[in-house]
Image: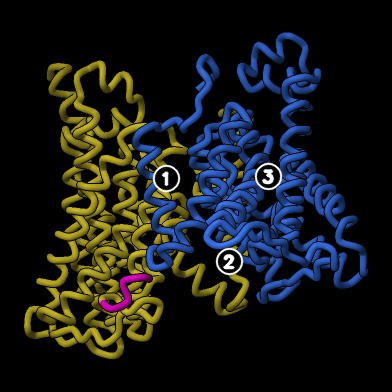
Amino acid sequence: MLTILFDGIAYGMLLFILALGLAVTMGLMNFINLAHGAFAMVGGYITVLLMQRAGVPFLLCLPAAFLGAALLGAVLERTLYRPLYRKPHLDQVLFSIGLTFMAVASVDWFMGSTQQFIQLPQWLRGRTEIGTGAWTLGMGHYRLFIIAVCAALTVVLQYILSNTRFGSRLRASVDDQRVAAGLGINVNMVFLSTFAFGCGLAGLGGALGAEVLGLDPTFPLKFMIYFLIVVAVGGTSSITGPLLAALLLGIADVAGKYYIPKMGAFIVYLLMIAILIWRPQGLFVRQGGKA
Amino acid sequence: MSDSSRAHLSLLDATRWRAWEPLLWLAAFAAPLLLSQYAAIVNEIAIVALFALSLDLVLGFTGIVSLGHAAFFGFGAYSAALFAKHVMPDPLVGLAVGIATSTLLGAFASFTVQRGSDLTRLMVTLGAALILLELANKLDWLTGGADGLQGVVMGPVLGRFEFDLAGRTAAWYSLTVLLVLFVIARRLVHSPFGATLKAIRDNRLRAMAIGIPVGSRITVAYTIAAALAGAAGALLAQTTGFASLDVFEFHRSADVMLILVVGGTGWLYGGVLGAIVFKLMQDFLSAITPQYWTFWLGLFLVVLVIVGRDRLLRPWAWFKRGSAA
């Protein structure tokens, strides 16, 4: 029981890191980016390639995955995404679906369609159990590691967002682009760096999650819906909203699959639709922000 | 002639059948006879065109972005296939059942698209399709689960025309259904009802202000679209004698959106034209690279959006950019 809760939290934290970039892009640029999963996949494959071909240790692969995905994100933002900010949502959806299809097919071409595995270092493979009976808490070390990394990231991000100059610029741009630009904030630069950073986070999440979520070329399509659920349910105006939504989703998914395996992902989708009918703007909406 | 009657005539003019329209349909009906080896692909085009027509009512005329239209397509397909397998093999009755069940589903689902932003609608429609996919997967005693629903044997159409191996009967059957439903949809969008839908698409707030009952109009439009999509699904299940989880998959919803956008939204022939272009392109590309054709599809989508989807199909507008913009 506690083990399920623990696994759910680990899963939710992972989803949070993966989806956070999406939440920020959507809140900031009002851009529906269905291709976000592709950046996560890039991060995962960078890790796999570095570890298998070059023998780089796991801990060094994580920043590499972050940088690789962030770089790719920056290049794509500058070249392809920027002209689309002002287009209708339908165009954005089509564009990002197209990008996802391309990413899936090209990874399939280069890497093959089989699932990739990551050899975790020895110290991450164990498992610790605390307590007895029904209240046993079994903690896989790797999941503990994921929770620690993601929690640290969350704290750092929250600090950047609320206490630094860049954070206040970012929040100003989210709230009202035109006024922010009028105040002398280089909104394009804020967009670019935020987009790249979000993609980097996705890449990091992909690298961390390759072991838990499984990594194959259909990754962006398979998990796109999960990222979108996190964003749609959590709202796009803060990072606590997506965090809570991701934790809720992670726990609901793991518990649902464990207790009622027949229903599968059914519960999650049903829950999402119910929440969205109840509160179309997401569960956690800050008053006063731009809709 | 007074101004009001002139305006009336110009409005009527838009609804008149053009000379090329009967020709197009004649060509479509002649295609299985003249190019009998392509009868199967004509059948597929007719089905996909009907599906795209259905999405056009929702997306092009009412302005609701739906990424889960496969829900109704698949629901129609499974109900028609189950009906043929367990109740009776007559295609027309099966088609009616498929349409009826997906109409009910559409009426039920229409409450989910009433509120919220584009993102909310995207998620809700996508979620509905995924729920049905999951249901069809898990209820394997009924649907055959991941193996698909096999052993569907169809009777002859109208008790006379057997489905042949070459697929000619299937093609004509699908084309006829497409034509009938197309005429109904055409009548619908040119009616005052259709005009209110377009008003909702263009500006929901103003539509509400001039007294259009936005909520009920969206419900009706969504339900009718669901019925058409169900008909398309039923046709697919009947002409292939098979229904599998594939009919609910995400790529179906994405494909049909692409088809509609290629042909042009808010124009009934958009779906038909897009279906022809898309199917021929798919056939051509997957003959070259069977496994990786989605890459080219994706590239096409990206280019389409970057160039501008209203300009790609009108090459003569490419060089007018400076003066028009």
Q: Which residue is mark 1?
A: A272
Q: Is residue A76 left or right of residue B167?
A: right
Q: Which residues are magenta?
A: B137-141
Q: Is residue A66 visible?
A: yes
Q: Which residue is mark 3?
A: A17
Query: Are dots 2 and 3 in contact, CB under 8 Å?
Result: no
The residue under the point 66% across, 62% down is A212
Chain A painted colour: blue
Callout 2 amino acid: Thr
> Does A60 lie within the magenta span?
no
Picture quadrant of residue A201: top right
Chain B painted colour: yellow
Disc 3 versus disc 1: distance between alpha carbons? 19 Å
Residue B74 vs residue A94, the one in the foreground: B74
The residue under the point 13% across, 17% down is B2
Q: Secondary structure at mark 2?
A: helix
Residue A206 vs residue B220, the one in the foreground: A206
